[in-house]
Amino acid sequence: MKGVGKAIQVDVYSDEISVFKQSKEDLLSLGYAFRFCNDLASFASPQNIPDVCIVELSKLDESHDVLRSLDKPYLVSGVNFHNNHTASSDALEHSVGFINGAPSVSDICVNIRLGLLWHKEREHFSRRGQDIDEKIRNNRMTGIAVGMLMHKSGLVEEDVLNCLKSTSRSKQRRMVDASCEIIENIHKSNELSLDSVDLLEEWLLLTVSHRT
């Protein structure tokens, strides 16, 4: 299992759990322990409170009260970036991230880690929601950048995100803006190799421009 200590506990409330179940062992080896719930009664049980939840878009309204009482971060699954978002739920606006309909293991891990980071930042600064389309776009661009950096470095998503977060703060840039700059520069550098945290940090500091 990745790192040392307790795995991140993840509750999934969805009719389409096969996409997560088939990756359960891989996710556990990376530090994410998934529990699958077929009904609202077993979801986010007080006897087994998760660290983060994943709720299918179609289940969001019925689980709104549970999510509010639980006061834990949650992501919404089954969201297609190119589709309209018809759910008119306050719960959708206060989610910490989105997972598309056919995610890879890397997609799942990156979006959970981004969601936990989002939640931590929001706890410090504001409980307000954010425009849904903007949030999806921001998470999508950051997720793409993290995935590309994972591929170039061989590092896990936690290490990459920590480097990206540190760089964006030192350069006084939003993570999404730094991510867009990273994506553009990776496309220009076919031979790029960043096989350690030190090399990644050095490249990010050289690549991401300071806020003007």
Image (cartoon, rainbow, N blue to C red):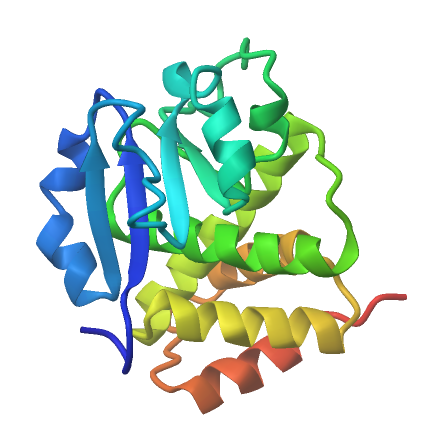
Find residue 104 and report its image quarter: top left
Quarter of the figure that contains the C terminus:
bottom right
- Looking at the picture, tell me which residue is in the foreground, 89 or 158: 89
Give the residue displayed 56% in from the left and 86% down from the top.
202
* On-image quarter of the N terminus: bottom left
Name the residue rendered at 71%, 29% in the picture: 131
Q: Is residue 164 above or below residue 104?
A: below
Residue farthest bottom in this picture: 198
Give percent across and percent down for residue 106. Answer: 29, 53
Left or right? Give the position of 112 relative to 36.
right
Can residue 207 be seen here? The reply is: no
> Percent from the top left, x then y, of residue 6?
28, 72
Q: Nearer the viewer, residue 175 or 86?
A: 86
Tell whether 36 sits left or right of 174.
left
The vertical placement of 19 against 47, above or below, is above
Toward the top, the furthest residue is: 86
Residue depicted at x 15% and y 66%: 29
User: What residue occupies the far right of the structure in this picture?
Assistant: 212
Report how many numbered discs are placed on residues in the image.
0
Q: Position of residue 185 (x, y in %)?
A: 56, 62
Can the viewer see residue 114? yes
Position of 34 with respect to 178 (left or right) is: left
Q: Residue furthest front?
A: 47
Side of 125 where 86 appears, left or right: left
- Quadrant housing residue 54: top left
* Coordinates of residue 100 in the picture (x, y in percent): 37, 31
- Residue nearer the viewer, 127 or 164: 127
